[in-house]
Image: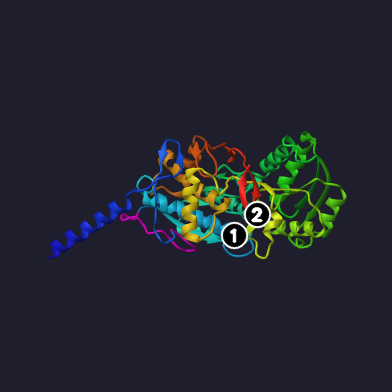
Amino acid sequence: MKKKALCLLLACAMTFSLAACGSNGKDAPAADSTEAESDATGDDAAAGDDAETPAASDGAVFKIGGIGPTTGGASIYGIAVQRGMEIAVEEINAAGGINGVQIELNFQDDEHDPEKSVNAYNTLKDWGMQVLVGSVTSNPCIAVVEKSHEDNIFQLTPSGTAEKCVQYDNAFRMCFSDPNQGLESAKYIGENSLASKVAVIYDSSDPYSVGIYDAFRAEAANQNIEIVFDAAFTADNKTDFSTAVSGAKSAGAELLYMPFYYAEASLVLAECKKQSYEPVFFGVDGMDGILTVENFDASLAEGLMYMAPFVANSDDEQVKSFVTKYQEKHNEIPNQFAADAYDCVYVVKAAMEAAGVTADMDASAICDAMVGAMTGLTYDGITGKGISWEASGEPNKAPLIVQIKDGEGTAL
């Protein structure tokens, strides 16, 4: 009887192992010549705060950590990133994992606070994190990259745009940098003759906003754009934009450039309506989400243009597959932060496979191998095709301009 029981246990273990390595889907992003295709349909999320994906039957897993704000004023970004990562992990695990090894995901809340982001990093490090996707916002990411560099842990931020987010050789980003957004914004405005007189409102307390504005201002001169007015606000003074809007209107600005996040932008647009000021509105990737602001008249955003790497109503089959899964799981349309995070997990997979890393390697050895592989990758995902990376950590990808038309973002 004991022998029969042992045989039954072994048979069950083998069945579980084979099921975990199965693949049954399509439309997953491609990187290099490696295909990771799946059509995962599991009801449970792959991970959450302090939640972990079940380990493979032999105990081998790749431990990927995530950090971002899932509570607080910036939670729309962190929640989207967590959800995007979860969908990618579910797909990859359903397709057999990374070289047959499952991913275990642990996502920690940082409340968009640098100190709490470092605390989240330390929690993940104690857990055994081998690769980090995060942090989501720039200031926390800058704080965390100091730690990941010190520990030599590979870090890929989906949306940390400040230059210092990738200041060390262990760090890369999926999104555009602040200077790139400012440069491309000025070029688009100039090359499409949107305006010759521009006003700028920016957040002088945020490296994200300052970095974009500095690059925009430098390129504006090359595009025959005159900045006729600018006004700064800070994190402590970001609710009353009456003076800034009045100044832009009085200066005769034909276009109002807003290099900051959607919450403040909704207040600016409402103030412009109040003052009967109707310039062209142009923003950056932080605008993604403005249509979801509570108690905001979404019609005020009609015609707003902004830079973004992703538009949910794209005809691209990979995008449609992701959007469908996201909507089925969360009953809402994903924003670019979810898309960037989804791509990040697939890029981690591609870099790991290209580098030939194994789950028994420590985080530092994995980092060394992945850093060497990153500059050789060419990745086709939902936030761009043919994406590659410089040793500086910066991605090479084509910019996308989105305009809100009939209540939804549409690629121009």
Q: Quarter of the image holding residue 14?
A: bottom left
Q: Would you place residue 165 above or below residue 386 in this image? A: below
| Rendering coords of residue 320 (x, y %) | 49, 48
Give residue 192's position: percent from left, percent from top. 72, 37
Q: Quadrant of the N terminus?
A: bottom left
Q: Residue at x 74, y 46 (%)?
A: 213
Q: Position of residue 150 (x, y in %)?
A: 56, 49
With 313 as the anchor, is 247 left or right in this view? right
Q: Nearer the viewer, residue 190 or 278?
A: 278
Q: Is residue 125 in sight in this rendering?
A: no
**Quarter of the image that includes the C terminus:** top right
Q: In which quarter of the view is residue 99 placed?
A: top left
Q: Position of residue 206 (x, y in %)?
A: 71, 53
Protein image colouring? rainbow
The reply to whether residue 380 is in sight is: yes
Q: Amino acid at mark 2?
A: Asn
Judge whether 240 appears above or below 349 on screen: below
* Magenta span includes 57: yes
Provide the major secondary structure of the magenta segment.
loop
Closest to the camera, between mark 1 and mark 2, is: 1
Indicate the quadrant where residue 181 lies: top right
User: Does the stretch in magenta take in 366?
Assistant: no
For badge 1, the amino acid type reads: Ile
Image: magenta residue range: 46-59
* Disc 1 target residue: 76
The residue under label 2 is: 139
